[in-house]
Amino acid sequence: MLFQLGWFLCVLFPGLLSATAAFGLVGIHLALVSQHRSRELQFILLGTVLGSLLDGLWFQLGVMTDSSGTVFWTPVWLVGMWALFLTTLAHSLSWMGSRPWLPFVLAPIAGPFAYWSASELGAVVLPAGWSSLLALALGWLVIFPLLMYIRKRFYPEITS
């Protein structure tokens, strides 16, 4: 539920304030949900860096832009959203780790759908339409299984 709240805050009010709220929600997650706070924080930080780098690449390549068209790399509210998303991989989405093929099937659909939804709400622009969605699908085909692998291999204790 914290992720959904943070996602809507970041998408409806993209900016520093929503990013601050997103990081606050990550803190609440660590305080109230996490059984291994320091290890889960390490995982969240690592995954946030990887996801933010991927988003930054998409901004640089023109796969997506923000509504102003002035973003140089990854907007801070998207960094906050990545941190929030990482909280789900050891908890509400941990069941996907028991089916190694599932992230490869669902991620190329669910990931781009989230960005398309954000574009419909005005947070980002997908200037190349279907080509943007295809690029997002390919990126999510790589990043999501990679993050699931990292969580399972290097941070197995954080799964609840």
Image: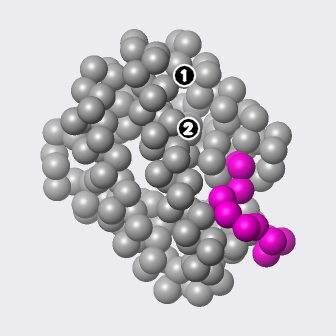
Would residue 87 be visible to someone looking at this image? yes
Residue 74 on the magenta span:
yes
Locate residue 72: give its quadrant.
bottom right
Residue in the image at 64% along x and 42% along y: 80
Dot 2, crowdedness within 10 Å: few (<14), some or many (≥20)? many
Residue in the image at 38% along x and 37% along y: 89
Residue 75 on the magenta span:
yes
Compute the Cα span from label 2 to label 1. 9 Å
Q: In this view, does 6 lie above or below 125?
A: above
In this picture, residue 121 sits left or right of residue 1: right
Dot 1, crowdedness within 10 Å: few (<14), some or many (≥20)? some
Determine the secondary structure under disc 2.
helix
Locate residue 31: give its quadrant.
top right
The amino acid sitting under disc 1 is: His
Return the mark for residue 29: 1
Q: Do the residues labelled 2 and 1 touch (CB within 8 Å)?
A: yes
Q: Is residue 28 above or below residue 142?
A: above
Determine the secondary structure under disc 1.
helix
Residue in the image at 55% along x and 38% along y: 84
The amino acid sitting under disc 2 is: Leu
Q: Position of residue 61 (x, y in %)?
A: 58, 79
Magenta: main secondary structure equals loop
Q: Position of residue 47 (x, y in %)?
A: 45, 43
Residue in the image at 39% along x and 15% along y: 36
Q: Earlier in the sequence, mark 2 or mark 1?
A: 1
The magenta segment is 67-77
Question: On the image, numbered disc 2 is attached to which residue?
Answer: 84
